Image: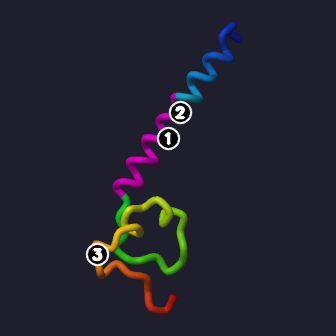
Amino acid sequence: MPKTWKRNTVIVGIGIAATMAFVFKKSAELERRTLYPRVWIPSMIWAKQFKDDSDPNFQPPKSL
């Protein structure tokens, strides 16, 4: 085992966390739904589509 395994582990962990943060941010920016979900889903918290009212056709179903 190399002498600097702890430092290397931290560097790789930071790299993975940064990559995952970028992928999450980009995915959230690009997310678009054509139909309103019938049940609550976690992405409703961060998706812009659920925060703005720019599309009048994108509304919850009347049965909810």
Q: Which mark is residue 20?
A: 1
**Does dot 2 land on a helix, a strand or a loop?**
helix
**Does dot 1 land on a helix, a strand or a loop?**
helix
Q: The residue under label 2 is which amino acid type?
A: Ile
For mark 2, what is the residue?
A: 16
Q: Quadrant of the N terminus?
A: top right
Quadrant in the rendering for residue 48: bottom left
For mark 3, what is the residue?
A: 55
Question: Alpha carbon of mark 1 to alpha carbon of mark 3: how far?
Answer: 30 Å
62 vs 8: above or below: below
Residue occupying the point 40% across, 67% down: 51
Kindly indicate whether the residue at mark 2 contacts the one at mark 1 (C-beta within 8 angstroms): yes
Residue occupying the point 37% across, 60% down: 31
9 vs 62: above or below: above
Question: Alpha carbon of mark 1 to alpha carbon of mark 2: how far?
Answer: 6 Å
Is 62 left, or right, of 7 in this rendering?
left
Question: Residue 19 magenta-drawn?
Answer: yes
Question: What segment is highlighted magenta in the picture?
Answer: 15-30
- Residue 4 in the image: state x and y as whole percent: 66, 10
Q: Main secondary structure of the magenta part?
A: helix
Q: The residue under label 3 is which amino acid type?
A: Asp
